[in-house]
Amino acid sequence: MGYIVDLTVILDQIFRSTAGDVSVHDALSAMDRHTISGCRDRIHRDIRDIVTKAFTIRTMVPRQDVVLEQIINLIRQYCVPLT
C-alpha cells in the first residue's frame, strides 16, 4: 500500500515539474524531495493508522474494497489537484 501511494505521489511530482520530458535526474530529484519533505513519513504513518483501525474495528458488513478506498484517499490527499 505504501509503495503504491509513494510511487503515485512521486510520479505526480515528476510529471507536474517536467511537462513529460523526464530525465533520470528529474526522477531522482523527485524521489529525494519526497523523502526530505517528510511526505513519505506522513504517508506511511497514515497507512499504519489505517491498518491499526482496520484490525481493531469490526464492521457489521464486510467490505472488500477498504484497502483500495484507502489508497485512493491517500493519493487524493497527497497529490496536488489539477486547477
Image (cartoon, rainbow, N blue to C red):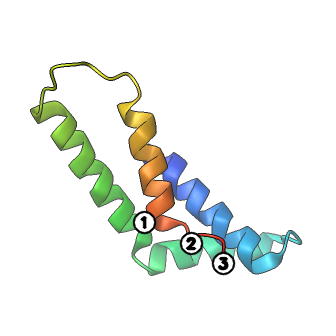
For this rendering, which residue is in front, 83 or 68? 83
Image location (x, y in percent) of residue 37: 45, 80
Name the kind of residue labelled 3 in the image.
Ser
Inter-mark Cα distance, 1 to 2: 15 Å
Q: Residue at x 25, y 40 (%)?
A: 51
Inter-mark Cα distance, 3 to 1: 14 Å
Name the kind of residue labelled 1 in the image.
Arg
Q: Which residue is mark 3?
A: 29
The quadrant where residue 77 appears: bottom left
Image location (x, y in percent) of residue 8: 60, 55
Q: At numbered mark 1, what does the secondary structure look like: helix, strand or loop?
A: helix
Q: Which residue is mark 1?
A: 40
Image location (x, y in percent) of residue 69: 42, 40
Name the kind of residue labelled 2 in the image.
Val
Q: Which residue is mark 2?
A: 80
Mark 1 or 2: in front is 2
Q: Residues within 10 Å of mark 2 (few under 14, many from 20)?
A: few
The quadrant where residue 62 appears: top left
Is 27 on the left or on the right of 48, as rendered?
right
